[in-house]
Image (cartoon, rainbow, N blue to C red):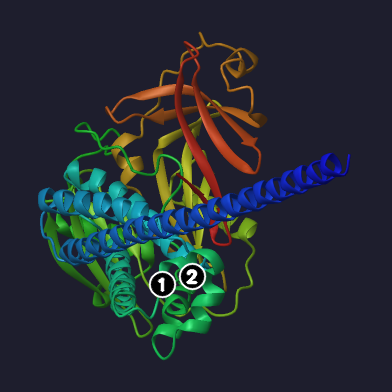
Amino acid sequence: MGDVGSKLKDWKNRLKDRHMFTIVMIIVVLLIAVIALGIYTYAKQREYREVAANDYNRAFYELISYMEEVETYLAKSTITSTPEHGAKTLAHVWREADLAGVYLGQLPINNEGLSNAQKFLNQISDYSYSLSMKTINGEKLTDEELKNLEKMHEYSVTLKDTLNQLANEINDGTIKWGELESEGSKTFAQQVSNISTDSFGNIETTFDDYTGLIYDGAFSEHMTSPERKGLTGENIDENKAKEIVKSFTGANDNQISSNGLSENGNIPSYSFIIKTEDNSKSISISQKGGHIVYMNYYREIGEEKISEQEAIERGKNFLNEKGYSSMKETYYLRQQGCLVINYAYSQDNVTIYPDLIKVKIALDNGEILGIETAGYLNCHTERRISQRIISAEKAKEKLNKRIETQSEKLTIIPTEYNTEILCWEFTGKVGENEFLVYINAENGKEEDILMIVNTPNGTLTT
């Protein structure tokens, strides 16, 4: 019995040792697996970081490349002398700015400066596209448009130079994409010294005072027409044009000097300069019919005392006095103490967007500083507006169900084919975004959608 008990005890000990051994082996295997998994995970994370860094580097250097093209073509656009070459150059600006914005959006940094730079690139793209459409139709850029391009060029140079500084800092290892991705601009500010510390901040500061381009709202890219329907009357000579300038502005003979007849633009016009002790005005009068095509001048604007609504009414009264009746305000932009307002012709309660006149009003005393009538002169005529239209309620059925409509009205809108369409215009919201949706008032087809952008400087559309 003793031998049996001893053997049984020995067997139990062996089983216990084997059990412990098994447990130890399992733990060792698990540890090895955890370590192997850790090594594998670390290797994959490192691989992912390297891939991400390569993607960010690629996007960044593509951004710099396109930004250099934007700056170059903007510079060219400010000195082009023909609409044909201007159209080609501006088309390049539009394309390169759009691509630069795409690559800027791929960078892993949430920074207000880069956000402002993104908006700037978007506006360069939109504005250059608008101007390219104008020059394609044979119109020369106005002095005001050229000044806008010059200002954009100045900002593009600053942005390009700042991006090149950042490229140097990335190359020497001062900035690491991974740290920027995980901790954003706070880490960046802690890491970078001297010029680097303020690089992204410099972008923000640069665009803080960039208050927007002269972008005139829905359908402001004036349609041109070989008929120039609003250009009525017989041809006049330079002396008659000068008399019209005197009547329109109150200037006398000694204050007016002539720059002669310009026949290269969409509307052949006599150009004059009015010089007084306080300012210098430029004004042009159409050869056919003696219509005001353009008048503008600059002066220092004092403290703003005129409300936007009062400025809108003053502009409307001014147009009535000058013979432009039934004009209704559409969109406006506030800039440098002035309100630039688009007025569209209204016929039988239908807003006719092609017939646009732009008026610039000083907000310190309500003075009219500028007027531009190209859209109106190209397109204005009395329309035969169809009465066989679908109701607003029927047109509303064609809208996306997500849109909460706020208002509707009948409008005539231009198309890219130099035609016009009678539409119901619906203003509505989807979430926080506002839209204008245009439904063909005769067949219910969705013709166009614009996004409304409300800014501190006015209401724009994209």
In the displayed structure, does residue 10 sit left or right of residue 193? right
Q: Horizontal and vertical percent for residue 384? A: 41, 18
* Residue drawn at (27%, 51%) of the image: 94
Depicted 4 relative to depicted 408: above or below: below
SS label for mark 1: loop
Q: Nearer the viewer, residue 122 or 18?
A: 18
Q: Give how far across and how far down residue 51 sits, in percent.
A: 35, 55
* Badge 1: residue crowd in 10 Å (few <14, some 14–19, many ≥20): some
Between 339 and 244, the one lying in front of the other is 339
Among all residues in the image, which is located at the extreme right? 1
**Element type at marker 2?**
helix
Amino acid tagged 1: Lys
Using the image, determine if residue 16 lies above or below residue 173. above
Labels 1 & 2 near each other (Cβ < 8 A): yes
Question: Where does the image place residue 158, in percent across and percent down from the top left?
Answer: 32, 76
Q: Quadrant of residue 62?
A: bottom left
> Could you classify mark 2 by the number of other residues whose Cα lies within 10 Å: few (under 14), some (14-19), or many (20 or more)?
some
Which one is nearer the viewer's eye here, 79 or 419? 79
Decide if residue 135 is in sight here.
Answer: yes
Please indicate, yes or no, whether residue 127 appears anywhere in the rendered image.
Answer: no
Label disc, if present, on residue 179 of the rendered structure: 2
Give amino acid for label 2: Glu
Q: Is residue 38 left or right of residue 176?
A: right
Kindly identify the residue that appears in the image at 53 percent across and 68 percent down. 184
Residue at x 81% of width, y 41% of height: 8
Marker disc for residue 39: none
Of residues 262 and 403, the one nearer the viewer is 403
Q: Is residue 236 above or below residue 182?
A: above
Labels in figure, total:
2
Residue highlighted by disc 1: 176
Q: Mark 1 and mark 2: span between their CA atoms?
A: 6 Å
- Extreme-top residue of the structure: 388
